[in-house]
Amino acid sequence: MTTREFYVNVLDLIDVIVSDDPTGCVDTDAMAAKARELIASLDAKNEKRKGTETKEKKEAAARREAVLAFLKEQTEPVTRDTIAGALDMTPAQAGAACKALGALVAKSEIKVDKARKVAYSIA
C-alpha cells in the first residue's frame, strides 16, 4: 500500500466513523484536514521531482544528441550496433536513443550476413 492509498483510505474511513459515532467523540474534521494536507504535500513533492533533471536524464539527453549528430553524418542506414560502437555506448542505449528521437529518425531493414536487422537513418 502506498502512502497516497493510505491517506485516501483514511478519508474513506472518516465517513464510516462519522456514521458509526454520532456522539462526535472522534475529531473527524481534523483527521480529514490532515489527510488532505498530506496528500497535497505528496502531490507537490511528486510535481517537483518530475521537473528535476536527474543524472540519468542528462545522460540520456546527451546520448540522443550524439546519436542524432552521428546519423546526420551517415549517408546510408546503420544498425544500432554500429552506432553503439562508434559512440562508446551499449546497443540497447543506442536503440533507445533512436526510438526516443521519434520522427527525426527513420527505421528500415537491412540484411547483415544472413540476418535482417533494423537500421536507422535521418528521416
Image: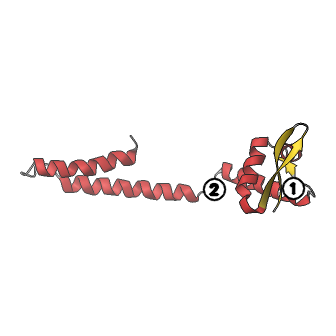
Label 2's element?
Answer: loop
Residue 71 sits in quarter: bottom right
Give residue 52's position: percent from left, percent from top.
Answer: 59, 57
Type of amino acid at the residue the image marks with label 2:
Glu
Give residue 47's position: percent from left, percent from top.
Answer: 50, 59
- Count of numbered circles on the image: 2
Q: Taking 32 as reference, is 1 above or below it?
A: above
Choose the circle earlier in sequence order: 2 or 1. Answer: 2
Label 2 neighbourhood size at 10 Å, few (<14), some (14-19), many (20+)? Answer: few
Could you say which disc has been placed on residue 86 in the image? none
Nearest the viewer among 36 and 86 is 86
Could you say which disc has been placed on residue 53 in the image? 2
The residue furthest top is 114
Tell me the CA gap for discs 2 and 1.
Answer: 24 Å
Quarter holding the C terminus is bottom right
Q: Is residue 70 left or right of residue 105?
A: right
* Residue at x 72% of width, y 59% of height: 102
* Residue at x 93% of width, y 58% of height: 75
Type of amino acid at the residue the image marks with label 1:
Phe
Nearest the viewer among 113 and 52 is 113
Label 1's element?
Answer: helix
According to the picture, the residue beneath numbered tag 1 turns out to be 70
Give residue 74's position: percent from left, percent from top.
Answer: 91, 57
* Residue at x 77% of width, y 52% of height: 63
Give residue 8's position: percent from left, percent from top.
Answer: 32, 50
Label 1 neighbourhood size at 10 Å, few (<14), some (14-19), many (20+)? Answer: some
Q: Is residue 66 left or right of residue 39?
A: right
Q: Is residue 74 left or right of residue 28?
A: right
Quarter holding the N terminus is top left
**Color style of the picture:** secondary structure
